[in-house]
Image (spheres, coloured by chain):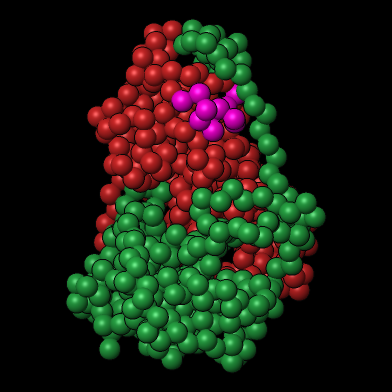
Chain colours: A green, B red
């Protein structure tokens, strides 16, 4: 069985304007739309395409989080994942512990590929995939914009500062997705109905022998300093004059 | 004493500009002793450039043919070994550092603070979250090593004039061969580097085509600027991905930033909020870019850009 594990994180929806709570304890989440982290949606879409090309047999969607995360896993099943596992934890959990928990599931499921988003759009950490690859002692191909599976190997094109880098990794390996890897499909109503019959297991984080206890203490959240709103100039001449006056051109 | 190891990014025998910024960040820790790790195939020139950075006390040079081109899986076990005896291990928040440092952290069993924008103490740091919509202050445990990536737009480059010693180090570390570099395609041009340029001109969706995007390049060349692009322009194929400025692209802090035909989605604004002066040109007077622009000009970019060029 050639299996792909993908990670799903429940985050505040991409289109929501995030606001810091007045007491600095976090950001406002009451009544705020929650969604699958966009990079994770891209990971799932890529897994589906790999399976559709005949290079994988099963896709397992995994999430760590509170009970509410079942919503996002149901969406993942509707998109086409074959089964899903929620590792339930009410506590906040950081990348090192997530990587340890994923490693436990990797040991159980023996995937050929693990595809994760390169970062979650809430904490913007960009750590989990690399940490899992290190703990698993397997290759990592981060920031992928193209993935080609060739038997026991994968060729991955990566979005790096210099341009596009292509590397070859032996499988199994961890791949993290960048924005332009694909455009995730929309879920249709019949898919949602069908997904209800798919297996969705819930296990407790503690049952994996992993502690959620965070390493980093969150002291406070603050809104970012606001830039002063500037002025509107009426034409090109006024703009150039203003920039000249400030010695910028 | 805080002993900080900074991992040097380099290519083609040249030290990346991000390293001097990581050194500044490291130097803002109290009572810091700073070392730089240079892992290269043949890194003497890079190491001597690193040794000239002010505030650095020593450079550890590891020459090994497997070290270039840089692969995180190959470098990480070596960095983890060099990290012994250090309290902090820093790397830049570039794709090089973002790829490598979490792998190092996991090998060390250390937590990582990503995108450090301010140092409050040896354990307390400020970093942006939610695309910069919130700034988080975190505290790392004092009794463990800490790995961090440094948000380079937040830091000035350390000055030159330093005279650190360069020590050649041979590491007895098993290196994996499960990861192989094949190729890199870079748009070669003579323009300044986007991440460190003093002036940047970015174009957005309103350019309408890759052909029209050449107007941005021409204007950038006219004022000696680097070229950037919004996500919309990159997604539409007007500009290559490495030019993307924003939350998931490059975070930049130029002296002068031109946002041309860019509406100013929050994810884009995250990438430019440290720019000294922002100029926005957009047809839509309601575009959010005007909320942050120092100078806004409402109108058609295809008319305005040539006019501005004529006035310069």
Residue located 47% across and 51% down the image = B248
Q: Is A9 covered by the magenta stretch?
A: no
On screen, residue A122 versus residue A133, left or right, reads: right
- Location of residue B250 with respect to A159 vertically, above or below: above
Q: Is B285 covered by the magenta stretch?
A: yes
On screen, residue A164 versus residue B144, left or right, reads: left
- Picture quarter with the N terminus of chain A: bottom left
- Location of residue A36 with respect to A93 vertically, above or below: above
The residue closer to the viewer here, A51 or B222, is: A51
Give the quarter of the image for residue A50. Answer: bottom left
Residue located 56% across and 59% down the image = A33
* One can see residue B292 in this view: yes
Give the quarter of the image for residue B180. Answer: bottom left
Instruction: Please state the horizontal and vertical placement of residue B218, each as a whole percent of the image.
Output: 33, 23
Image label count = 0
Q: Which residues are magenta?
A: B284-294
- Location of residue A244 with respect to A98 vertically, above or below: above
Instruction: Please state the horizontal and vertical placement of residue A148, each as a whole percent of the image.
Output: 24, 67
Give the quarter of the image for residue A93. Answer: bottom right
Residue located 65% across and 84% down the image = A211
Residue located 43% across and 7% down the image = B311
* One can see residue B39 in this view: no
- Location of residue A185 with respect to B248 vertically, above or below: below
The residue closer to the viewer here, A207 or B192, is: A207
Instruction: Please state the horizontal and vertical placement of residue A125, each as a whole percent of the image.
Output: 56, 61
Main SS, magenta region, reads loop
Instruction: Please state the horizontal and vertical placement of residue B130, each as a whole percent of the image.
Output: 59, 53
The residue closer to the viewer here, B302 or A18, is: A18
């Amino acid at each position: 069985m050639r299996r792909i594990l993908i990670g799903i994180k429940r985050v505040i929806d991409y289109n929501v304007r995030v606001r810091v709570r007045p007491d600095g304890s976090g950001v406002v989440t009451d009544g705020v739309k929650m969604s699958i982290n966009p990079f994770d949606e891209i990971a799932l879409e890529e897994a589906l395409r790999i399976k559709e090309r005949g290079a994988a047999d099963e896709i397992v969607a995994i999430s760590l989080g509170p009970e509410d995360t079942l919503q996002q896993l149901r969406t993942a099943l509707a998109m086409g994942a074959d089964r899903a596992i929620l590792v339930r934890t009410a506590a906040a959990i950081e990348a090192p512990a997530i990587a340890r928990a994923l490693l436990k599931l990797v040991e159980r499921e023996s995937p050929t590929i693990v595809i994760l988003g390169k970062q979650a759009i809430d904490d913007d950490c960009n750590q989990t995939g690399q940490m899992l690859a290190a703990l698993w002692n397997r290759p990592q191909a981060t920031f992928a914009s193209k993935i080609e599976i060739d038997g026991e190997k994968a060729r991955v094109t990566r979005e790096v500062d210099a341009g596009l880098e292509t590397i070859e990794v032996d499988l199994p390996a961890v791949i993290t997705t960048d924005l332009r890897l694909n455009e995730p499909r929309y879920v249709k109503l019949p898919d949602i109905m069908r997904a209800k019959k798919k297996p969705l297991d819930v296990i407790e984080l503690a049952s994996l022998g992993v502690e959620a206890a965070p390493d980093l203490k969150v002291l406070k959240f603050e809104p970012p300093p606001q830039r002063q709103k500037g002025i509107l100039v009426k034409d090109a001449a006024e703009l150039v004059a203003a920039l000249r006056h400030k010695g910028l051109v | 004493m805080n002993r900080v190891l900074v991992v040097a990014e380099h290519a083609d025998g040249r030290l990346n500009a991000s390293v001097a910024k990581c050194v500044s960040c490291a130097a803002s820790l109290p009572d810091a002793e700073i070392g730089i790790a240079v892992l290269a195939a043949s890194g003497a020139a890079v190491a001597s450039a690193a040794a000239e950075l002010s505030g650095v006390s020593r450079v550890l040079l590891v020459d090994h043919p497997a070290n270039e081109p840089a692969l995180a899986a190959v470098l990480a076990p070596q960095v983890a070994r060099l990290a012994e005896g250090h309290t902090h291990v820093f790397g830049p928040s570039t794709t090089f550092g973002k790829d490598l440092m979490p792998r190092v952290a996991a090998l060390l069993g250390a937590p990582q603070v990503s995108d450090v924008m301010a140092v409050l103490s040896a354990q307390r740091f400020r970093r942006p979250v939610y695309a910069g919509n919130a700034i988080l202050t975190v505290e790392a445990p004092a009794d463990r090593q800490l790995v961090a990536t440094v948000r380079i737009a937040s830091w000035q480059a350390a000055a030159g004039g330093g005279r650190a010693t360069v020590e050649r180090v041979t590491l007895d570390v098993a290196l994996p061969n499960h990861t192989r570099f094949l190729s890199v395609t870079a748009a070669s041009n003579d323009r300044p580097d986007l991440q460190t340029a003093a002036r940047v001109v970015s174009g957005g969706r309103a350019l309408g085509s890759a052909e029209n995007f050449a107007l941005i390049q021409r204007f950038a060349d006219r004022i000696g600027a680097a070229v950037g692009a919004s996500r919309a322009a990159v997604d539409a194929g007007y500009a290559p991905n490495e030019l993307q400025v924003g939350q998931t692209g490059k975070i930049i802090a130029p002296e002068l930033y031109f946002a041309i035909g860019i509406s100013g989605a929050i994810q884009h604004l995250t990438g430019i909020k440290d720019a000294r002066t922002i100029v926005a040109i957009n047809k839509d007077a309601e575009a959010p870019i005007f909320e942050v622009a120092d100078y806004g000009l409402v109108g058609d970019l295809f008319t305005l850009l040539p006019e501005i060029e004529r006035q310069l």
